[in-house]
Amino acid sequence: MKRTFRGASVVPGFTKAAAALAFALLGCATAQATTVNVTAAATNAEESGATAAPATVNLSASAVALRDALSVLSANKAKAGSGISSLNIVLGSGTYQIASTLTVTVDPTWSGVPVTISGPADGSAIITGSKVVTGFTAVTDSNALSRLPTAAHGSVVVASLAANGVTNLGTFNRHGYGISVTPAPLEVFFRDQPMTVARWPNTGFATIASLPGGPTGLSFTVSGGNPTAWAKEPNLRAFGYWARDWADTTLPVQSVDGSGTLTLQSPAPTMGLAVGQRVVIENALSELDSPGEYYVDQTAGLLYFWPPATMSTGDVQVSVANSLLVFNSATNLLVQYLTLDIGRGDGIQLNGGGKNTVDHVTIRNMGNRGGVSSAGSSGFQYVTMANTGEGGITIYSGNRTTLAAGSSFVTNSTIHDYARLSRAYRPAISLSGAGDQITGNTIYNGPHAAIIFGGNNHEISNNEIYNVVTETSDSGAIYAGRDWTMRGTIIESNFLHDIGSTSQPTATMGVYLDDEYCQTTVRRNVFSNVMQPVFVGGGRDNVISDNLFVNSSPAVSADSRGMSWQKADVTSASGVFQTALRAVPYNTAPYSTQYPNLPSILTNLPGVPLNNVITRNVVIGGTQLTADSGAAQYLQIGTWFGPQDVVFSGSSSASTASVTSGSTTSQYGSFVLSPSSPAIAQGFQPSQFSR
């Protein structure tokens, strides 16, 4: 029997011009699975304003707009039908162009009801926060031509953004090290690839030549460039590793004077400026001199662009929406087989709630992160993520006071090119809390870390990581630091290869336990062509065992910074270490039982790197250990194995000679050990990495 509900409801975040929404749903008196069919045509017509949001939304219709379908979750479930046992919102193939974030604050009455939002298995349901830009013409304005490089005349074209329905161009906010993530301003994409805001130099970096205002000032000069032209640029910006090769900031340039001195907008970068540090000048029409570059005239609302190939209709898109999907307090939610493409903010947020999964979803071309979750027992699996501006996936899950596990996860996913805009401390995966998992992922192409973790009792295993830490120094592919209480994580059976920077090879690490990080186990991993595979930076109670190090030297590094240059931080009651210590019940259960050495940390030689165990590791083509005198006296060193203790097996495996030569360093199959290896007979436990 057909039953229809006709009642009015205003749904926060989903109203248009304060329209009252009502829901009509095909159902029956008994519990049943309910399917809502969503189409791109209905969605795009409503988002563009071609059709108005209906006063009564019939969710049993054959073509429902996406925003209307999602809004049912923000209202009392009884309005949709008390007999619903599960809700399936099914998107057909097509491109869903949304004008603003799809935000769903799930009503508590939906608790316990499984909700699935899915598209076709081929990912052909594409939700995009972009607008297509057309109407490009040759540049004829004399002022623009005078600013454009002569070589760009005839190649750069211009279009009115307002004529394409784009009037909100966003706001540029300084971004980078230590700065909260905010939506990027409008960006340009060509055939679904991010383009480059006009910059100098076109590739690589310039360096700071002098500091007229000193290292704590705002002024600097560079050798070369076009300061006379830059002085005429109204919204000039500068990106730089201003004082450290692991801390970047992009911020406005206040002025450029006749001598070529550039003055940054206050405040100065966090750590000041230093001669020789790397910088880029950007957002200048006068630097639009290469295919793929663009410039947005904020005042006139014009997009100047040098297309990298002959343009066709639909090739050029600009980001207009902030985050694409935001779910607040959702439970039992499955988002599956969708493509989330282009936005100024995050691809998807799971804020609170629990038992939510993002599965087989492609997320790309976001201005901020691909995904963010603070939901318990939730996460991302079989996700493909690329070209994000401020990192890949961020997980906050678990209770650090009780050490209750969050049981959240990032598994079997591929993440690459994940730090386009801010370059350092924007990892592919950021993890904090307690009791979560990062397993089975492939991560590559990143200027800084692949994984940054904090908190307790995590598992980081079976991940392949390569071509990261390519632009920064004093950095690690897997990184944690500066807290004595964050313990219990296991880093196991990962394959790290081809890590580091050619410009700073001695300051790039594989696993970096920085600034006295403690009680982390690094075991059964394979490191190939990693400059410093494992670095213990002054911490204690760490275990480094059963790893295979190939062409990676020194295999393990350790120092005693808490006894020397970091001693003041150790002894200060208001310092970072003791402040973090007081933030958790470190001397009572469960901390005292799970980490028995922690309660005495202030009375048992604080800052001294005690109880670090290094044993049963294989080193081929490198040295075993580097440690300063303070650390060396406390290390507990067991067996080291060498080439004579290893036999590689399998058709894809290599001889010890070929491995040492570096000819097979990027294939895990080259490092599979035969059970007949003498090292195994003596207790070595090989990696369980698998794909």
Image (cartoon, rainbow, N blue to C red):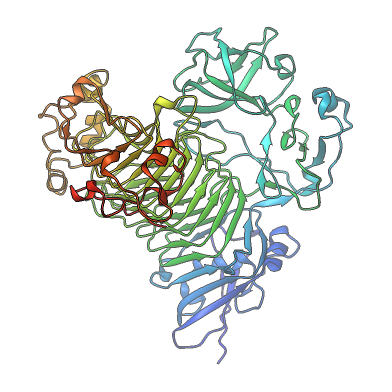
Is residue 479 in sight in this rendering? yes
Quarter holding the N terminus? bottom right
Name the spot of residue 278 as percent of width and height, x first: 55, 21
Name the spot of residue 319 as percent of width and height, x first: 66, 46
Q: In front here: 386 or 144?
A: 386
Quarter holding the C terminus? bottom left
Name the spot of residue 28 as percent of width and height, x first: 50, 88
Q: In front here: 521 or 170?
A: 521
Is residue 20 in sight in this rendering? no
Q: In this view, does 201 lie to the left or right of 103?
A: right
Classify 214 as above or below 310.
above
**Which residue: 83% across, 43% down?**
136
Q: In this view, does 639 lie to the left or right of 461?
A: left
Q: How many marks?
A: 0
Q: In this view, does 607 lie to the left or right of 430?
A: left
Classify 23 as above or below 208.
below
Tell me the quarter of the picture where residue 142 sits: top right
Q: Residue furthest bottom?
A: 1
Classify 355 as above or below 246.
below
Q: In front here: 11 or 229?
A: 229
Q: In front here: 676 or 341?
A: 676
Name the spot of residue 447 as percent of width and height, x first: 50, 35
Classify 527 as above or below 268.
below
